[in-house]
Image: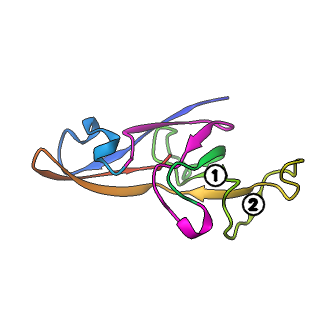
Amino acid sequence: QPVARVQAKHDGGTGGAKVPADEAGGLDNHAYLSRGAKVMLTRNLWQAQGLVNATVETVEDVVWLPGSSRSDLPLAVLVSCPTYTGPTRWKTEPRPDFPDGIPIVPIPAVKSTFEHDGKNMSRTQTPL
């Protein structure tokens, strides 16, 4: 399977790319995405519906805007999430342990603001 190395977007001066994820709201400087890859959610997105930090999901597809590079931030990463209980338009094919299929959920990029070396910075990245 092809693998996309997605680079985070940084604002607030130089050096933002070197800030570790634990200082940038759990967002890595880059993410590797591929269909079928197991990924872990790095923040709570919708706790009441099961999209919580450390949930393991599977990448079903990655959606970019037309004309975008595969290293750009995607519009969304479509993940199958067995713990998700909210509304969805898509599900995986049925299987014995999930006869109705597993819900597929779009995960958009999120922005985290933080201070580093006395500068206010931000990082935008897919929280996976």
Foreground residue among 44 and 87: 44
Magenta highlight: main SS = loop
Foreground residue among 102 and 59: 102
Q: Where is residue 56 in the image (x, y as percent from the top left)?
A: 60, 45
Looking at the rendered structure, the secondary structure element under dot 2 is strand
Mark found first going from the N terminus, 1 or 2: 1
For label 2, the crowd category at 10 Å Cα-Cα, with few meaning under 14, some 14 to 19 and many 20 or more, is some
Q: What residue type is labelled 1?
A: Leu
Residue at 54% x, 53% y: name it: 65
Span shown in magenta: 26-50
Location of residue 5 with respect to 116 vertically, above or below: above
Q: In this view, does 117 lie to the left or right of 18?
A: left
Residue at mark 1:
78
Quarter residue 60 falls in: top right
Structural distance between the alpha carbons of marks 1 and 2: 10 Å
Residue at 52% x, 39% y: name it: 70
Q: Residue 8 carries which label?
A: none
Q: Position of residue 27 (x, y in %)?
A: 39, 46
Residue at 77% x, 57% y: name it: 91
Q: What residue type is labelled 2?
A: Trp
Looking at the rendered structure, the secondary structure element under dot 1 is strand
Q: In this view, does 109 lie to the left or right of 85?
A: left
Q: Are marks 1 and 2 in contact (CB under 8 Å)?
A: yes
Residue at mark 2:
90
Q: Position of residue 62 (x, y in %)?
A: 61, 46
Location of residue 76 with respect to 36 vertically, above or below: below
Q: Position of residue 43 (x, y in %)?
A: 45, 54
